[in-house]
Image (spheres, rainbow, N blue to C red):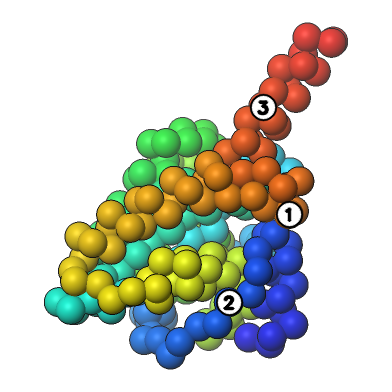
């Protein structure tokens, strides 16, 4: 991905650029026929919560092998709505993150879920779960990092602020650190693009504005 593109996306999120190390390949293009469309078209903006979610996963190296970390982010204010840590990058990893997001948000119909075309995200189990939840699936093109750049930017930030700061003994240690980071990111990190407030606070302000409009009507 071009450096200017990364800088633009990080600025949109209100984040600073980070230096990343070499990584392993986590995206394996799915062999199944995928009938979902590219609904996002690289426009990572939303006018309200539960309009657009983006999903991706990354990894952390531990003394006992790799730990894989999946995130689902609500684009409106950048809230991380679902996440999971696993010792494998099978479909169950991303499915568990999706289940957490669906349980926590209860979005109803109409939300768009965007991901890359990795085999986990285009698997029958995952696409069927999206369909059952009335979530519209959108996937990027094969081998094009532009098409899920916002989620990848969050992955890079997470690795710079958590994973690359120390060595990790096992998956459980990564999971505990991720739990703390997600709580901090959602409730205390100040993001420039939403007025230097935390993501959760920005969402609360949005819903409060709707109540005020109803009272004024």
Q: Which mark is residue 18?
A: 2
Q: Is residue 198 above or below residue 15?
A: above
Closer mark to the observer between disc 1 and disc 3: 1
Q: Earlier in the sequence, mark 3 or mark 2?
A: 2
Q: Which mark is residue 207?
A: 3
- For the C terminus, the quadrant is top right
Q: Say if mark 1 contacts mark 3, CB within 8 Å.
A: no
Residue of label 1:
192
Q: Quadrant of residue 109?
A: top right
Residue located at (51% from left, 34% from top): 108
Percent from the top left, x then y, of residue 196?
72, 48
- For the N terminus, the quadrant is bottom right
Which of the two residues, 122 or 10, is positioned nearer the viewer here?
Answer: 10
Residue at the left extreme of this rendering: 64
Residue located at (48% from left, 42% from top): 134
Residue at the front extreme of this rendering: 166
């Amino acid at each position: 991905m071009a450096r200017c593109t990364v800088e633009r996306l990080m600025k949109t999120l209100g984040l600073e650029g980070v230096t990343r190390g070499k990584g392993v390949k986590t995206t394996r293009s799915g062999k199944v026929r995928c009938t979902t469309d590219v609904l996002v078209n690289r426009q990572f903006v939303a006018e309200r919560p539960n309009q657009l979610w983006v999903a991706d996963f990354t990894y952390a190296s531990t003394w006992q092998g790799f730990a894989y970390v999946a995130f689902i982010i609500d684009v409106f204010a950048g809230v991380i709505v679902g996440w999971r840590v696993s010792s494998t990058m099978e479909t169950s990893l991303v499915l568990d993150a999706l289940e957490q997001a669906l349980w926590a948000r209860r979005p109803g119909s109409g939300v768009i879920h965007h991901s890359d075309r990795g085999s986990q995200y285009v698997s029958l189990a995952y696409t069927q779960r999206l369909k059952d939840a009335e979530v519209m699936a959108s996937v990027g093109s094969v081998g094009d990092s532009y098409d899920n750049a916002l989620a990848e930017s969050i992955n890079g930030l997470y690795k710079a602020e958590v994973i690359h700061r120390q060595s990790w003994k096992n998956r459980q240690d990564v999971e505990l650190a991720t739990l703390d980071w997600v709580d901090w990111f959602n409730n205390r990190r100040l993001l420039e693009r939403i007025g230097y407030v935390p993501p959760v606070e920005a969402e609360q302000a949005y819903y409060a504005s709707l109540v005020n409009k109803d009272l004024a009507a």
